[in-house]
Image (tube, rainbow, N blue to C red):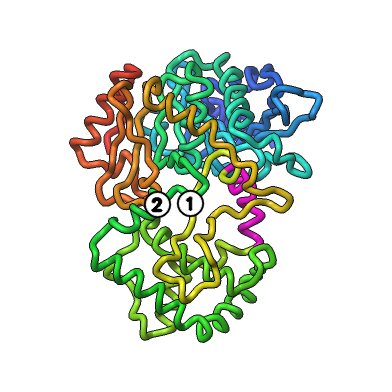
Amino acid sequence: MKKNITTLVFLLFYVLLWAHPDQKQVEKALYNLKNVTFTALESSDDNILEYKLQVRQPIDHNDESKGYFDQSVYYVHRGFDRPTVMETNGYTLSHGQTELPKYFDTNYLSVEHRFFGDSTPKDTPYEYLDLQQATADLHQVNQLFKELYKGKWISTGISKGGQTTLFYKYFYPQDVDIAVPYVAPFNKALEDKRIYEFLDNVGSQQCRESIQKVQIALFENKQQILPKLFWYAKGAGLKFDYIGSLEKAYDLAVLEYPFAFWQGGNDCQELPQVQNLDQLTDDFLKISNINFFSDQMMKKFASHYYQAGTQMGYYGYDITPFKQYVSFTENPSAIFMPQGTTTDSFDQSLILEVQKWLDTQANDILYIYGDIDTWSATRVIPSKEVNSKAFMVEDADHYKARVSNMNPKMKKDFFDHFEKITGLKPLKSK
């Protein structure tokens, strides 16, 4: 018995010895933060503390009588003297840190976008899903944690999260010292036709022609391929009531093929033999899967489509080469609005305001894009009136346009600009 007690005391001493020295202070601070509840998470890294937070946010920041919802935040503490990165997600929350916290050894707050995932109030009130409300959520999180962290603040986000970074910087320019949006489109219309121009010029002519041959083969062999996809959809539990039918989902997925091909950085040398229907079908499901147009995905991304169709703009599908194969009489939109809403309420006024700001006042932003990523078609090109800079990563798609994949010269240029704006140097070189 005495031996067991001695062992227990030793283990307790060992745990306390290796506990993060800031744990008690951090958790005391979290207890005292208004409208914040937290759960400690296990970490495999002894140098950090990890937490899942719930931040109480007003549904309407202009009228709190409309009620509240809980916004999920993933939080990593490294040190009170460290900078802080704020990840402005465009969709649901994912645990794990992106690359900037690792380069600069920062604290980290990853904020789930309002009305996505667990951060969704009952009976989603879409009328309060706009960029003014979404960035007000971020501002509230920022102001809460500035009570803990007095050092430099960095905002960042990827794809739609990068768009959120841009609009957050527009509405609250003093919240952070620097913004680093990755692969962030800035769309200027419901159907931004710069996408079509990009797809007509990206890669080699031979590759573009081969992609179009795949699309034509998919259309011409639709009746033979659809039965295969019926059983695929049945096995995966996919339904297409929202789109209208499996066949319509098929047509849209064929039109989506080149967009998805380049966004995903696929290899032209691996395009299928169009005569082999099994190979053609397998490739189709790999590149532009029909599940993207399923009821499940429509529900998952309903808030995204609402934002695209009311404020942010998006893209469509150019049917010019395929009119003999499709029933569409005009280019179909890639926006699938939630039931009860329409794109009739699309308002371009914020886009015009932000475009003017981007050209004249949008300082301290470092943009990162990939040159073969479809979304670079609607990228931001900084003007000479601002100190912001864009970095186009060579041969990089939507998922490889990262600092870690920059060539040495570009990476040095990125970190030099970062240091010039913030005074921070990277602690690690990858």
424 relative position to 225: left or right: left
Residue at the image position 45 percent from the left and 15 percent from the top: 151
Secondary structure, mark 1, is: loop
The residue type indicated by label 1 comes to Tyr
In the rendered image, residue 271 lying in the magenta stretch gets the answer: no
Q: Is residue 256 above or below residue 340?
A: below
Q: Residues within 10 Å of mark 2 (few under 14, many from 20)?
A: many
How far, Cα to Cα, is label 1 from label 2? Answer: 7 Å
Which residue is identified by label 2? Answer: 195
In the rendered image, residue 298 lying in the magenta stretch gets the answer: yes
Mark 1 vs mark 2: which is more N-terminal?
A: 2
Which residue is identified by label 1? Answer: 315
Q: Is residue 68 above or below residue 22?
A: below
Tag 1 near tag 2, CB within 8 Å: yes
Residue at the image position 22 percent from the left and 36 percent from the top: 410
Which label is found at residue 181? Answer: none
Residue at the image position 43 percent from the left and 40 percent from the top: 184
User: How far across and how far down the image is residue 246, in percent?
Assistant: 61, 73
User: How far across and how far down the image is residue 298, in percent?
Assistant: 63, 57
Residue 44 visible in the displayed image: no
User: How far across and how far down the image is residue 45, in percent?
Assistant: 47, 36
Please state which of residues 169 and 221 is positioned toward the viewer in this rendering.
221
Residue 191 visible in the displayed image: yes
- Most common SS among magenta residues: helix
The residue type indicated by label 2 comes to Ile
Residue at the image position 35 percent from the left and 70 percent from the top: 212
Which region is colored magenta?
295-307
> Split into 4 quadrants, where in the image is the N terminus?
top right
260 relative position to 15: left or right: left
